Amino acid sequence: MSLRRRIQELVQIMREEDLAEIEVRHWFSSLRVRRGGAEQAAAVAPAPAAPPREDAAPAAAGADASAGEAPAKNLVPITSPMVGTFYRAPAPDADPYVEMNEPVDVGQTVCIIEAMKLMNEIESEVRGRIHQVLVENAQPVEFGQVLFLVDTDRAA
């Protein structure tokens, strides 16, 4: 099958299934088709909150409300630009690049992702404070996976 025909089939599948990206791997070859602009929209859109179950205990709802401060309104995700292994520090015995509630600035390195024996420094694209670290050190990450949430309301 020609490459052109294969791409046309993938685009048709993307339309039918309303997909933003599709990748096909076969042996040592890989073909990825992505809609323009779809990546940024998907990366920024927060996951919808699950509706409360009717059988949930009322005490649990009260505990969440009194757990501390109100939830931040302006959380911006820092996502993984590649598949690889997530590292919080430049070396095993070094301090992490960032911790929770620490200020972060645009262009500041927040972690490293190792891919194919290359250490790729991941930089923040926003200014704020680290609200949450979502990945454990030395864990594998996927393309587009959210690594950190940055609270831009509480800017540094």
Image (cartoon, helix red, strand yellow):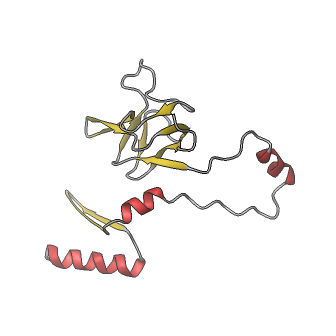
Q: Position of residue 83 (x, y in %)?
A: 34, 47
In the rendered view, would you say 150 is above or below 57? above
**Residue visible at 70% across and 63% down in the picture:** 51
Q: Position of residue 9 (x, y in %)?
A: 26, 79
Q: Residue furthest top?
A: 93
Residue nearest the viewer, comparing 3 with 151: 151
Residue nearest the viewer, comparing 117 with 79: 79
Q: In the shown orientation, is residue 23 left or right of residue 78?
A: left
Q: In the shown orientation, is residue 94 left or right of residue 58?
A: left
**Residue visible at 30% across and 64% down in the picture:** 23
Q: Quadrant of residue 56?
A: bottom right
**Residue visible at 43% across and 34% down in the picture:** 138
Q: Position of residue 84 (x, y in %)?
A: 35, 43
**Residue visible at 45% across and 26% down in the picture:** 96
Q: Position of residue 12 (x, y in %)?
A: 31, 81
Q: In the shown orientation, is residue 55 left or right of residue 21?
A: right
In the rendered view, would you say 58 is above or below 68? below
In the rendered view, would you say 19 is above or below 47? below
- Number of numbered markers: 0
In the rendered image, the quadrant that contains the N terminus is: bottom left
Q: Residue furthest left?
A: 2
Q: Quadrant of residue 14?
A: bottom left
Q: Quadrant of residue 6?
A: bottom left
